[in-house]
Amino acid sequence: MKALQQLTKRLEDMEALDRFADLVQRVVSRIVPQESARKDLLSGTWLGRPLHPVLTDVVMGTWTSTSALDVLGGKRAEQAADQLVFIGTVAALPTIAAGLSDWAELWGAQQRVGSVHALGNATAFSLQIFSIKARRGGKRKKACLLSLASLVIAGASANLGGYLSFVKGVGVNQTAFENWPQEWTPVILAEDLAEDTLTPARADGARIMLYKKGEQLYALSDRCSHRGCPLHLGQVNDLMLECSCHGSIFRLSDGEVLRGPATVPAPTYEVRYQNEKVEVRRTLR
């Protein structure tokens, strides 16, 4: 386990990967630009959660079943194994596309680990293509070995994907662990809240973003649920807040995602004037 951690740390420090990663990211960003329908589709905005992890289950499940049938199924399982490897390989196409779309937003150590993760997945995909070709040519043993090698590489790559998600927090709701104030909590003097201005504040350690429009007050978490960028650095148009980092748009009234790549709504607060101060408390849903 320690050796695996050391290996991952070495990948994070491999600056030699940066030139390759920067080149590929520029290409991906042109094909799937921010603030586009393609970006929302591949991010999973329409699903309410990241799309890439959902698709990986289909690919890994079918490829694992393929190798299990290859090894244990015998002659009667050959057709089923061939069908499964084909399904998994077709499903890998949107999975890779969604993964590249997410990876195009990363930088530094996350970008480097993501680069190796992507290369591993591309290698596993290629091996399955060769396996399908071998199956159609009647070369069963070669096909089985290719699929098994692909599965091993895909598993190692999946480990890096898990590291990005569960250690580095890529794709995780960045507001999930905020310490929300449940009672009315003063955050700023009323005179300090300017009209039409995104104003940062804090409530019991939680980062709050305030906005005043006429007599109406709005309060959201100041962390974008997508990558944690400060929302008070964004801009408001027609009571819709656009994050300055990746262009996600949230509705001020209820925090709903109107445009991705964010998939989770921004947490909102009830807000009021009390004793010449602005107070907030977490909105219960």
Image (spheres, rainbow, N blue to C red):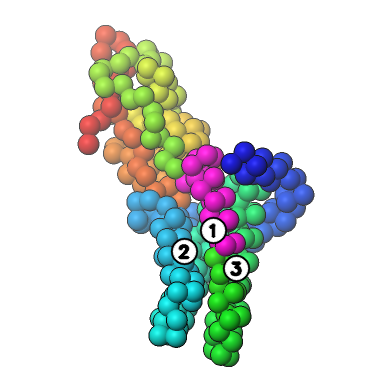
Q: Residue at x 44, y 42 (%)?
A: 172
Quadrant in which the N terminus appears: top right
Determine the residue located farthest toward the bottom in the rendered image: 137
Seen in the picture, residue 204 relative to 150 is either above or below; the reply is: above
The residue range painted magenta reads: 152-171
Name the spot of residue 283 as percent of width and height, x first: 25, 30
Q: Which residue is mark 2?
A: 60
Q: Secondary structure at mark 3?
A: helix
Residue kind at label 3, given as amino acid type: Ala
Q: Main secondary structure of the magenta part?
A: helix
* 243 sits to left or right of 8: left
Query: Foreground residue, 254 or 154?
Result: 154
Q: Which residue is mark 1?
A: 155
Residue kind at label 2, given as amino acid type: Met
Q: Badges 1 and 2: C-beta atoms under 8 Å apart?
A: yes
Q: Secondary structure at mark 2?
A: helix
Q: Residue at x 34, y 29 (%)?
A: 219
Query: Foreground residue, 14 or 270?
Result: 14
Q: Residue at x 35, y 56 (%)?
A: 47
Mark 2 or mark 3: whose residue is earlier in sequence:
2
Query: Foreground residue, 58 or 31?
Result: 58
Residue 221, can we see it?
yes
Q: Residue at x 63, y 48 (%)?
A: 113
Name the spot of residue 233 as percent of width and height, x first: 50, 33
Name the spot of residue 64 as percent of width and height, x first: 46, 67
Determine the residue located farthest toward the right in the rendered image: 16
Q: Badges 2 and 3: C-beta atoms under 8 Å apart?
A: no
Q: Badges 3 and 1: C-beta atoms under 8 Å apart?
A: no
In the picture, the disc for residue 149 is 3
Mark 3 or mark 1: whose residue is earlier in sequence:
3
168 drawn magenta: yes
